Image: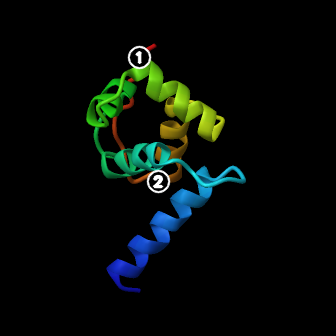
Amino acid sequence: MNLQYRMILDYTARVERLHLGKHPMKLTVDVANYIQHHMSEPITAEKIAEELFLSRPYLSRKFKEETGESQMDFILKEKRRKPNASSAIRINP
């Protein structure tokens, strides 16, 4: 399987996991992409919000509304799903 095909499969699988019977918002897809691209680094809600030029409370609220789970729950789930990404997870309330 070539790299481009695997990338497309990975992307569609991530979007599928976010899908709750409606089309995911761009914001939710951006968060998922950030997490996927930074799996080997410590990930915090603050870093994601800063990268997307949003406040942490706003981003957290919108992500939870769209996906039904918190960003940290999503990050933990993704990191468990990809065991090769051994990295630190920092949870800041």
Residue at 57% across / 51% down in the picture?
24
Which one is nearer the viewer's eye here, 52 or 36?
A: 52
Q: Amino acid at mark 2?
A: Lys
Q: Quadrant of residue 43?
A: top left
Residue underneath mark 1:
92
Answer whether residue 77 is visible to the viewer in this image.
Answer: yes
**Circle 1 Cα neighbour tier, 10 Å, few/some/many (<14 / 14–19 / ≥20):** few
22 to 53, vertically: above or below:
below
Q: Residue 34: x, y in percent?
A: 35, 46
31 to 91, vertically: above or below:
below
Q: Is residue 83 left or right of residue 37?
A: right
Q: Is residue 93 left or right of residue 22?
A: left
Which one is nearer the viewer's eye here, 89 or 55?
A: 55
Q: Is residue 63 left or right of residue 41?
A: right
Q: Amino acid at mark 1?
A: Asn
Residue at 46% across / 23% down in the picture?
58
Toward the bottom, the furthest residue is 1
Label 1: state its secondary structure: loop
Report, in whole angstroms, how far the alpha carbon at label 1 lies from the one at label 2. 22 Å
Q: How many marks?
A: 2
Question: Earlier along the polypeptide chain: callout 1 or callout 2?
Answer: 2
Toward the right, the furthest residue is 21
Residue underneath mark 2:
82
Answer whether residue 91 is visible to the viewer in this image.
Answer: no
Residue at 49% across / 26% down in the picture?
60
Label 2: state its secondary structure: loop
60 to 1, vertically: above or below:
above
Q: Residue 9: x, y in percent?
A: 49, 73
Toward the top, the furthest residue is 93
Which one is nearer the viewer's eye here, 3 or 53?
A: 53
Residue at 59% across / 31% down in the picture?
64
Q: Residue 16: x, y in percent?
A: 60, 60
